Amino acid sequence: MTELDTQTRWNEAFRDAVLAGLSPPRKTLPSCWLYDARGCELFNAITRLEDYYPTRAETTILSRHAPDIARFCGEGAALLEYGAGAGIKTELLIDALDAPRLYVPIDIAGDELLCTTQRIGRRFTSLKISPVLADFTGAFHLPDLPRGPRVAFFPGSTIGNLDRREAIAFLTRMRAHVEGGRAIIGVDLKKDRKTLLNAYDDSEGVTAAFNLNLLERINRELDGGFPLDRFEHEARWNEAESAVEMHLVSLDARKIPAAGRSFAFQAGESIHTESSRKYDLDGFAALAEAAGWRLARCWRDPQFAVLGLDAG
């Protein structure tokens, strides 16, 4: 498939997601579409904010326990990273691994994937890298993988973006990819509501800009007519799902064109753009077991956990 074919496929997938998401009474858009080039820039800025603790906490855990995590992964591992993003935490793990054979970054954001591949290639010159442009929440083809241990890496608490059914399906596919290997997964732990909501509605307004950028993307790529000044970012706590939700709330009633259709909004109506579920260790262990994994190791602090799963 050529680069043009790939871009056309993603454009069509984005259009289909917008049409499907804005048509029902409860409007939703998959969080993966937040990450165009501008969205990736804004998210990387979010990870440096004081209010946003997960990146700091996970990076500290990975740095502190890198040798032990590397021993858990095994010698000569092929590392598969789902939702690679900027790959900053990945460098900590690769640097600690014993003679890794291959790195496979998987991401839906093509520009970010290219930058990550190039940067890690410059630092680890002997490491073979095979990037995959794909939505990791669905089925996709992996490149040929060498013999030896395989390790799935899924940092950043992104597992929390998936509901139970989606998470089990994803973890099941991941288990098939590593063929009896292991996984390292970042999990955000349950904590007080104020800390959680501040992390997704920071005082500097960067998360609001990140969320609103999705409407700007629709305007740019799908001939949308969203007035950005008439929508507001809102973070909500969903107790039943144990999740922080991000919404884009319409301030007034109007009809908005996008992707050749017109969508009616009432004042106060929202588009649900992301959920970030929070776990306790027993709850996540049960989720992993439903997909055939065993919780084997845990490296944590009071806010965040990096978990080692075994599929053997």
Image: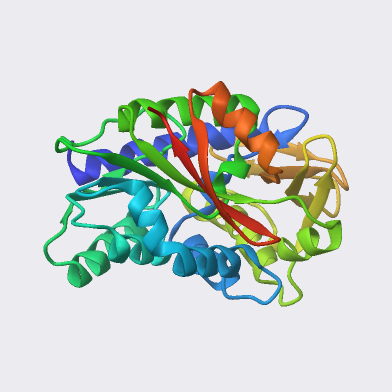
The residue shown at (69%, 35%) is 283
The residue shown at (25%, 34%) is 142
| Residue 299 percent across, percent down from the top left | 55, 55
The residue shown at (88%, 47%) is 267
| Residue 204 percent across, percent down from the top left | 71, 77
Above or below for 13 versus 52: above
In this picture, residue 15 sits left or right of residue 140: right
In this picture, residue 197 sits left or right of residue 37: right
Q: How many marks?
A: 0
| Residue 207 percent across, percent down from the top left | 66, 65
Q: Quadrant of the C terminus?
A: top left
Q: Nearer the viewer, residue 262 or 83?
A: 83
The residue shown at (16%, 58%) is 127
| Colouring convention used in this rendered image of the protein | rainbow
Above or below for 227 versus 244: below
In this picture, residue 212 sits left or right of residue 166: right
Residue at the farthest left position: 126
Let me know if residue 262 appears in the view.
no
| Residue 202 percent across, percent down from the top left | 73, 70
- Which image quadrant for residue 143? top left
Q: Quadrant of the N terminus?
A: top left
Q: Nearer the viewer, residue 293 or 276?
A: 293
Above or below for 157 versus 200: above
Let me know if residue 11 appears in the view.
yes
In this picture, residue 89 sits left or right of residue 126: right
